[in-house]
């Protein structure tokens, strides 16, 4: 590993620690939002949950809005990254088996704690002016990225009329399934809907 | 109108007034929930909005939970009643034009103030034990009724495998479109998605 100058040796672990603290705060913020809703989610509560001092938390995120929008964006990016890695193990493009797995994975994006956290943020933003603009911009970025990922994984040709809207509607359905899972475990019904709609989507994408 | 006994004459207008008060409270409760969310929605706020005394409001609805679950159920029933009346003016069963209109009308159930109010109630119920059971039961009733209406209007044959799940997925998509409309006016995109999904649904229902 050779000689490390003292300055470099001190700086890098510090940057790493700072990065690790930031990550702990982001993950704690999403689980806090999912469990306690917006009204129960403050920077202090998240700092405590992450085992970080309140001062350190405020060094990373100046406002409550900064922390929670960054948290939802971070976890959404992480989940979409995981989804893109799924691509390497998919059945051949154009096969019904591939469409089925992709529809399942896309719906999975909207049925976990991330969706629950995002939903709390959306609903709070619908009532609070200063949050609304931030969350609207965040939602547009995350939504565009989900759409791009869906098109790529489904091997869909958006130059064909109707294909873009079929994929958009699929993501809307996934969001609706997430909502149906909010109060009760809707997994059984969801599995049957996903299975049938994988067939419908496959047919719609190939029949234009 | 002939002879009316004094007792009857006093009683009926009183019942009518009581019914009118109840209706005013229910409608005010839904608009309050849609605009201010659960945390801003109390029996007092609704009573004031409806122009009714707090005592009268509490005579009709003992608790905050009673008032708001009854309100969402009342407005949902009213909207589904209106939807059923649409049935008399629909194009012939089995035609693409009919499917298109029905999909538009179903999506319309989830994009107005009622959906916004229901969403606030769902999200609050996901954090509050005592509200959760009530709202879960309400949601199950309203969901079943929406499903029955959709099957009837689409003239769908649920004895055919996959048809039930196709209709369920359509209602999930409608809910997802409602969610997408929460922060921004999503009407343009929604129109294009609905138009394409009406084609997809039509194909799925007729091809089994």
Image: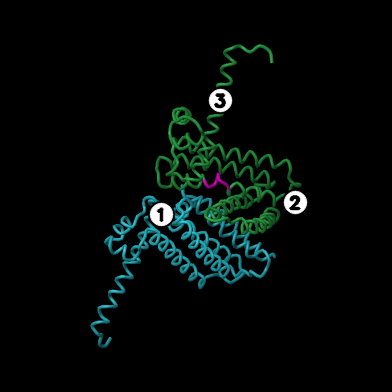
Chain colours: A cyan, B green
Kindly identify which residue carries mark 2.
Answer: B95
| Picture quarter with the C terminus of chain B | bottom right
Q: Secondary structure at mark 2?
A: loop
Q: Which mark is residue A79?
A: none
In the displayed structure image, the side of residue A34 where residue B105 appears, left or right: right
Give the residue displayed 29% in from the left and 64% down from the top.
A56
Callout 2 crowding tier (Cα within 10 Å): few <14, some 14–19, many ≥20: few
| Nearest the eye: A88 or B59 | B59
In the displayed structure image, the side of residue A97 where residue A44 appears, left or right: left
Kindly identify which residue carries mark 3.
Answer: B17
Q: Secondary structure at mark 3?
A: helix
Residue B66, horizontal then vertical, whole percent: 46, 35
Question: Any magenta on residue B91?
Answer: no
Give the residue displayed 54% in from the left and 68% down from the top.
A149
Residue B202, horizontal then vertical, whole percent: 69, 54
Kindly identify which residue carries mark 1.
Answer: A34
Q: Which numbered disc, 1 or 3, marks the residue closer to the eye?
A: 3
Give the residue displayed 52% in from the left and 67% down from the top.
A145
Q: Which chain is disc 2 placed on?
A: B
Give the answer, above or below, for where B148 lies relative to A142: above
Q: Residue furthest bottom?
A: A2
Give the residue displayed 66% in from the left and 70% down from the top.
A159
Question: Any magenta on residue B114?
Answer: yes
Magenta stretch bounds = B112-116
Q: Secondary structure at mark 1?
A: helix
**Residue B195 position by quadrant:** bottom right
Q: Which numbered disc, 1 or 2, marks the residue closer to the eye?
A: 1
Q: How many angstroms separate mark 1 from mark 2 (CA)?
A: 44 Å
Residue B165, horizontal then vertical, whole percent: 60, 51
Q: Residue furthest right?
A: B92
């Amino acid at each position: 590993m050779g000689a490390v100058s003292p300055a470099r040796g001190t700086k890098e672990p510090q940057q790493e620690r700072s990065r690790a603290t930031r990550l702990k705060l982001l993950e704690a913020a999403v689980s806090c939002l999912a469990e306690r809703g917006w009204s129960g989610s403050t920077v202090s509560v998240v700092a405590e949950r992450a085992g970080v001092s309140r001062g350190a938390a405020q060094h990373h995120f100046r406002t409550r809005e900064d922390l929670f929008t960054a948290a939802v964006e971070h976890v959404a990016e992480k989940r979409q990254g995981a989804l893109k890695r799924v691509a390497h193990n998919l059945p051949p493009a154009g096969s019904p088996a591939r469409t089925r797995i992709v529809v399942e994975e896309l719906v999975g994006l909207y049925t976990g704690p991330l969706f629950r956290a995002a939903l709390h943020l959306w609903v709070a933003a619908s009532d609070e002016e200063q949050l609304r603009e931030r969350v609207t911009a965040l939602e547009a970025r995350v939504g565009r990225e989900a759409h791009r990922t869906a098109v790529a994984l489904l091997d869909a040709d958006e130059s064909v009329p109707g294909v873009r809207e079929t994929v958009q509607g699929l993501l809307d359905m996934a969001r609706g399934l997430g909502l149906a899972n909010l109060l009760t475990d809707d997994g059984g019904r969801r599995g049957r809907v996903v299975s049938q709609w994988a067939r419908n989507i496959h047919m719609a994408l190939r029949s234009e």
